[in-house]
Amino acid sequence: MAETDIGPPDFRTMLPEVIAKNYGQWKYHENIKPGVYKHVAEGGDEVYTVRCGSPKLVCTDFIRDLCDIADKYCDGHMRFTSRYNPEFLTPKKENVEPIVAAVTKLGLPVGGTGRGISNVIHTQGWIHCHTPATDASGVVKAIMDELYPYFVGEKTLPHKLRLSLACCLNMCGAIHASDLAVVGIHTRIPGIDHEKLHAQCEIPTTAQGCPTKAIRKHPDPNVKSVVVAEDKCMYCGNCYTICPAMPIANPEGDGVAIFAGGKVSNARKPPRLSRVIIPFIPNNPPRWPELVAVLKQIVEVYGKNARPLERFGEWVERVGWEKFYKLAELPFPVQLIDDFELARDTLRSTTQFKWS
Ligand code: SF4
Ligand code: SF4
């Protein structure tokens, strides 16, 4: 294959020997204990996988520690799942417990497999990105401290439950297709620094960058700046990306929404998009207690009421959203009604529908 500097290197050049040999020829797999999988190939080869939890933002020393484990027990191979779980793969059964011990010594929990909660996929948050309406790592840490028993297998659920967090509506965190998701939401129009705007931003580009055309030239011709029509602004933060003199972050108005019912898998039902179930919870750093409490409540209601092997969205679809709100003891605020003008086909406007 031709070498280029575009995109990631070809993964096939980095597969462990046993995976390359049996690629596409796996017969079955078992979750032999929380965090440990055994895969068996058609030809009889076995591979054991130890999965652990990890923060998303890590330092090079931490990566070196993981690589030392991979060098010692896995012929120098390891991988990160799409939800950032470090995974160590070995064909040697006798290496499983030493890997578990080495990972535990690093302070990482072994788990995230089977009918429970895996690592939470999330975005950059206050530590890095410029448009977040909430933090990412801090919120996820607070959530997973509470849901930890579901990661290590002390508690189980009807099926796997994928959690994610995106700190603004750009949704870098794949929240649209997770069972439960937290999304940062701005609720105030951007501030405008008229002193800086004319020096830092190009006014026509800034106005054109607004999806709802809420940005206009300042009515005073002597002020080289813009104004925002509050009734048109949807708080997307796009203008701040284009113009640093229009910051969208607001300590009073920023918070999170909760989405639910999405999935990527094609098993039983096609992939599903998640829907908003709670439109707004204000930020309450450093531990977001209100958010954590409501997420725990929703996870427990799912655990108690869904059938075995029913994903979150499949369960809600079976019982109905109205019943879900009752079971979860959640209010149904008006903001959940999709009143976008093209949404009349998605509204349940039939005379057959009754709120029960
Ligand atoms: Fe930045 Fe938004 Fe992505 Fe968060 S979700 S990292 S704020 S673009
Ligand atoms: Fe327009 Fe979005 Fe900026 Fe509001 S936040 S003015 S909708 S670009």
Image (cartoon, helix red, strand yellow):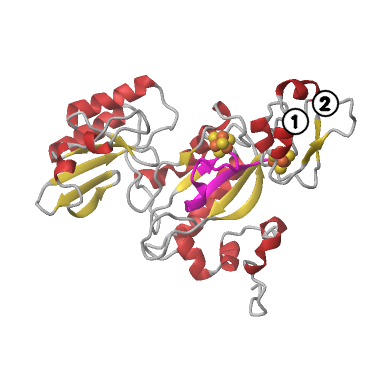
Q: Is mark 2 within 8 Å of ligand 2?
A: no
Q: Is mark 1 within 8 Å of ligand 2?
A: no
Helix, strand or loop at mark 2: loop
Q: Is residue 268 magenta?
A: no
Residue 188 visible in image: no
Q: Residue furthest left?
A: 43
Q: Is residue 261 above or below residue 111?
A: below
Which quarter of the figure has residue 127?
Answer: top right
Circle 1 residues within 10 Å: few <14, some 14–19, many ≥20 = many
Q: Gap between marks 2 and 1, in whole Å?
A: 8 Å
Spot occupied by residue 58 in the image (x, y as percentages of width and height)? 41, 26
The amino acid beneath tag 1 is: Ile
Q: Residue furthest front?
A: 2
Q: Pick the residue in front: 221 or 80.
A: 221
Q: Is residue 210 above or below residue 334?
A: above
Residue at coordinates 24% horizontally, 27% vertically from top-left?
A: 69
Residue at coordinates 58% horizontally, 44% vertically from top-left?
A: 183
Q: Which residue is mark 2?
A: 224
Q: Earlier in the sequence, mark 2 or mark 1?
A: 1
Q: Which residue is mark 1?
A: 203
Q: Quadrant of the C terminus?
A: bottom right
Q: Pick the residue in front: 227 or 303.
A: 227
Image marks 2 and 1: residues in contact by CB distance under 8 Å:
yes
Ligand 1's image quarter is: top right
Residue at coordinates 67% horizontally, 79% vertically from top-left?
A: 351
Residue at coordinates 15% horizontally, 41% vertically from top-left?
A: 18
Circle number at residue 142: none
Which quarter of the figure has residue 333?
Answer: bottom right
Spot occupied by residue 338 in the image (x, y as percentages of width and height)? 67, 60
- Magenta span of residues: 165-187
